[in-house]
């Protein structure tokens, strides 16, 4: 038998023997690619969940600030009415009104800042709304269908 024929027979035998191994390798590569896709999708969903949680916390904080602001406004109005109704205004009354008014100003600035942050965050929520992954936030009334913050 000639050397080239021996080499050809050995090569054919090796090919036949390694076919199952190549199939396993190809299947393994396909599985790895699918797994990588799933891992990427899980990371995206995790980031989406974090963004939603962050948005909910911002919204809850802003609502609490709005309630505190309204309470402070009511208190300042009550003190102002008390000063107007009183024939003799004391320093204690003026100081209480000044503190209430500064509290209203501080809370108003804080509320505006929080609303701006929400308005800045809301556009990123639009993408999630369009994909339907924010049904909970929509049903809670945090944002509307367009992704705009509802307060």
Image (spheres, rainbow, N blue to C red):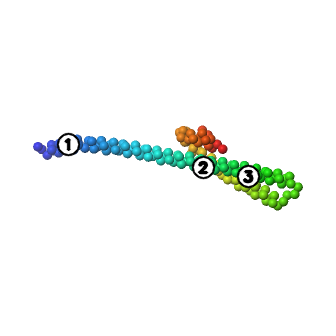
Q: Residue at x 71, y 55 (%)?
A: 106
Percent coordinates x, y for residue 13 in the rendering: 20, 42
Q: Residue at x 45, y 46 (%)?
A: 40
Nearest to the observer: residue 58 or residue 12? 58
Classify the position of the N terminus by image quarter: top left
Alpha-carbon distance for marks 2 and 1? 66 Å
Q: In the image, is residue 13 above or below residue 94?
A: above
Q: Residue at x 79, y 51 (%)?
A: 78
Which residue lies under the disc numbered 1? 13
Q: Secondary structure at mark 2?
A: helix
Percent coordinates x, y for residue 101 in the rendering: 76, 55
Q: Are marks 3 and 1 in contact (CB under 8 Å)?
A: no
Of marks 3 and 1, which one's residue comes earlier in the chain?
1
Residue at far right of view? 87
Percent coordinates x, y for residue 57 in the rendering: 60, 49
Give neighbour class at mark 1: few <14, some 14-19, many 20+ (Cα, 10 Å): few
Q: Secondary structure at mark 1?
A: helix
Which residue lies under the disc numbered 3? 72
Alpha-carbon distance for marks 3 and 1? 89 Å
Alpha-carbon distance for marks 2 and 3? 22 Å
Of marks 2 and 1, which one's residue comes earlier in the chain?
1
On the question of residue 148 being in view, the answer is no
């Amino acid at each position: 038998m000639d050397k080239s024929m021996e080499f050809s027979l050995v090569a054919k035998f090796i090919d036949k023997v390694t076919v199952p191994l190549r199939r396993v390798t190809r299947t393994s590569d396909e599985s790895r690619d699918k797994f990588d896709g799933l891992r990427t999708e899980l990371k995206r969903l995790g980031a989406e969940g974090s963004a939603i949680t962050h948005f909910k916390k911002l919204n809850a904080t802003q609502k609490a600030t709005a309630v505190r602001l309204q309470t402070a406004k009511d208190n300042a109005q009550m003190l102002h009415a008390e000063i107007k109704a009183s024939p003799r205004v004391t320093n204690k009354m003026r100081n209480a009104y000044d503190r209430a008014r500064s509290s209203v100003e501080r809370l108003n600035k804080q509320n505006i800042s929080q609303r701006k942050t929400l308005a800045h965050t809301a556009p990123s929520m639009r993408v999630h709304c369009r994909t339907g992954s924010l049904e909970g936030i929509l049903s809670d009334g945090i944002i509307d269908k367009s992704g705009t913050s509802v307060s």
